[in-house]
Amino acid sequence: MIVDPTLTPPATPSLSSADSLPDYSTVLHSPNPPRYTRGNTRPLQPITYTFSPWAASSSTAGEGSTLLLAPPPPGRSAPQEPVYRVSTHMSLNPFLPLSYVTQVHRAGPYDSAVDGELVGQFDISLHQKRAVLTVGDTTTRVGNVLSSIDSSLRHWRWSFHNIILRWDCRTHLDDGSPMCICYTPTSPVSPTSPNRSQDHQLASFVPPSPEASPPLPPAVLTVFPAGHEEHVFDHIVLSALVVERWLVRGM
């Protein structure tokens, strides 16, 4: 692993100098997730995916520790194959703060107990501000990738190599759920610039309100055709999950 010693984490509201970490940054074989063949062409219309709880028949994990992200079934036919598998487990490393690790894998059939290729993962401390992101061959602080726009706790910029996204979660639905819209800039201009009206929408994400009474509705991710481009879909899913964690933290 080659480490760039000149890289310093940008100052963001979500990080504290008291929570020191090594300068995670890498310039390795590939800055992107593993390559794969999705098997489907780019859709002509937006597709709505749902995060649904899943557990293998032999699994002893707690309910909700694994979610499948899958499109709706066409009519009354069998469910379509999921595109991602999202799992969360607790990290009990004795040398690090207690944290939860969320992993996003390529998904196989519904009944498969074997994870596909790892797209990325993030490790976020429960009681401290330590947060580490791994995508492909790159490991870095979450604060190096996700930064607040205009010091807002609901407006974020995601920048990972050539992938730049903007998440705007400043709107709420009637039930209190945040309505998060994902954009990509139409030009190399920074998403923090005033000219955001021309940004292209790639996706929308509606997680359940943390204050809602159970049973909670499933989180829903709608992805537009351009959001299905190679690697972009991966970062939409990863960044949506990280942003949701940041929304809960900001409550």
Image: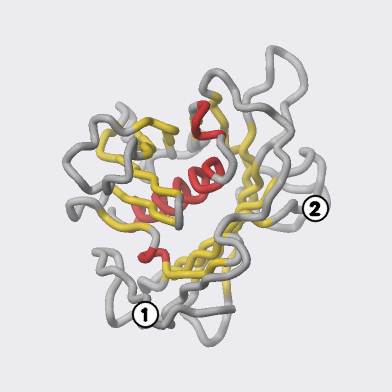
- The residue at 52%/43% (across/down) is 232
Give the residue at the far top of this rendering.
75
Split into 4 quadrants, where in the image is the N terminus? bottom right
**Where does the image place residue 37, in percent across and percent down from the top left?**
73, 41
Q: Specify whether 139 is left or right of 251.
A: right
Q: Nearer the viewer, residue 188 or 157?
A: 188
Q: Which residue is mark 1?
A: 6
Classify 62 as above or below 188. below
Q: What's the residue at 38%, 31% (across, down)? A: 201
Vertical relation: 82 (above or below) 67: above
* x and y percentages locating residue 248 in the rendered image: 36, 53
Q: Secondary structure at mark 2?
A: loop
Residue 73's place in the image compared with 31, above or below, is above
- Going from the N terminus, do you reach mark 2 or mark 1 first? 1
Total residue callouts: 2
Q: Quadrant of residue 137?
A: bottom right
> Would residue 141 be visible to someone looking at this image?
yes
Amino acid at circle 2: Val
Q: Which residue is mark 2?
A: 114
Looking at the picture, which amino acid does disc 1 mark?
Thr
Could one spot residue 102 in this view of the protein?
A: no
Question: Mark 2 Cα within 10 Å, few/some/many (few <14, many 20+)?
Answer: few
In the picture, measured across the screen, residue 124 lies left or right of residue 40, that is: left
Residue at horizontal 46 percent and vertical 69 percent from the top: 140
- In terms of depth relative to the viewer, which is nearer, 248 or 182? 182
Residue 198: image tag: none
Extreme-bottom residue of the structure? 95
